[in-house]
């Protein structure tokens, strides 16, 4: 982290969701930085057979960013943006500035207004 609490950070993870044998979707999951993506919740949300992390090449192509620098915004119609309600509830939300050494600050409410994510409970406590 760059000096701010992990709970105020947006963790952005590109997921591959297999709905059935022929249908695969990609999801940009945004959760608080001190939590983890609940893959079972994502699988249930899409009534899918499988939900897991996307391969790095697909993630980079869809997010248009290198791993570790993914923004909490989707600019690709093939990448559905889903944010946990705890992300948009934050008065202060930090995310990287598409690089590893800079962060941007926005309110959760402004993030929701600008990004228009689907709001769903997809975060779980981090292990440990």
Image (cartoon, rainbow, N blue to C red):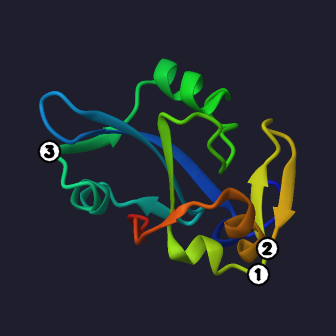
> Which residue sits at x=14%, y=45%?
49
Q: Secondary structure at mark 1?
A: loop
Crowding around mark 1 (Cα neighbors within 10 Å: few <14, some 14 to 19, many 20+) is few
| Percent coordinates x, y for residue 9 in the rendering | 69, 63
Q: Image quarter for residue 67?
A: top right
Position of residue 101 relative to residue 125, above or below, is: above
- Front-most of residues 15 and 8: 15
Task: Kindly state the secondary structure of the residue where label 3 is placed.
Answer: loop
Residue 97 image offset from top left, x and y in percent: 82, 44
In the image: residue 17, left or right of residue 88: left
- What element does badge 2 sit on? loop
Disc 3 versus disc 2: distance between alpha carbons?
35 Å
**Apparent side of residue 48 relative to residue 119 in the rendered image (left or right):** left
Does residue 57 appear left or right of residue 15 in this picture?
A: right
Location of residue 110 in the rendering, given as x and y in whole percent from the top left corner = 78, 71
Q: Are marks 2 and 1 in contact (CB under 8 Å)?
A: yes
| Percent coordinates x, y for residue 69 in the rendering | 70, 37
Identify the residue at horizontal 59%, vertical 54% (top origin): 11
Label 1 near label 3: C-beta < 8 Å?
no
As drawn, is 5 to the left or to the right of 24? right
**Quadrant where the image shows the C terminus:** bottom left
Disc 2/disc 1 C-alpha distance (Å):
5 Å
Residue wearing tag 3:
49
Above or below, comparing residue 70 to residue 31 in the picture: above
Label 3 CA crowd tier, 10 Å (few <14, some 14–19, many 20+): some
- The front one of 35 and 89 is 89
Q: CA distance from mark 3 to mark 1?
A: 35 Å
Residue ID at (31%, 57%): 42
Q: Pointer 2: what residue?
A: 107
Give the residue at mark 1: 91
Are the residues tagged 3 and 2 within 8 Å (C-beta)? no
Q: Does any portion of residue 3 appear in the rendered image?
A: no
């Amino acid at each position: 982290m760059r000096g701010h609490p992990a709970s105020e950070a947006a963790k952005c993870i590109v997921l591959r969701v297999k709905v059935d044998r022929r249908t695969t979707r990609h999801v940009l999951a945004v959760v608080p930085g001190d939590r983890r993506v609940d893959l079972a919740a994502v699988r249930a949300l899409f009534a899918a057979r499988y939900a897991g992390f996307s391969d790095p090449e697909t993630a980079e192509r869809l997010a248009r960013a290198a791993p570790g620098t993914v923004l909490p915004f989707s600019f690709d119609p093939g990448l559905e943006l889903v944010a946990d309600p705890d992300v948009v509830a934050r008065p202060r939300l930090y995310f990287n500035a598409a690089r590893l050494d800079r962060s941007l600050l926005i309110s959760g409410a402004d993030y929701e207004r600008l990004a228009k994510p689907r709001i769903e409970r997809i975060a779980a406590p981090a292990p440990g």
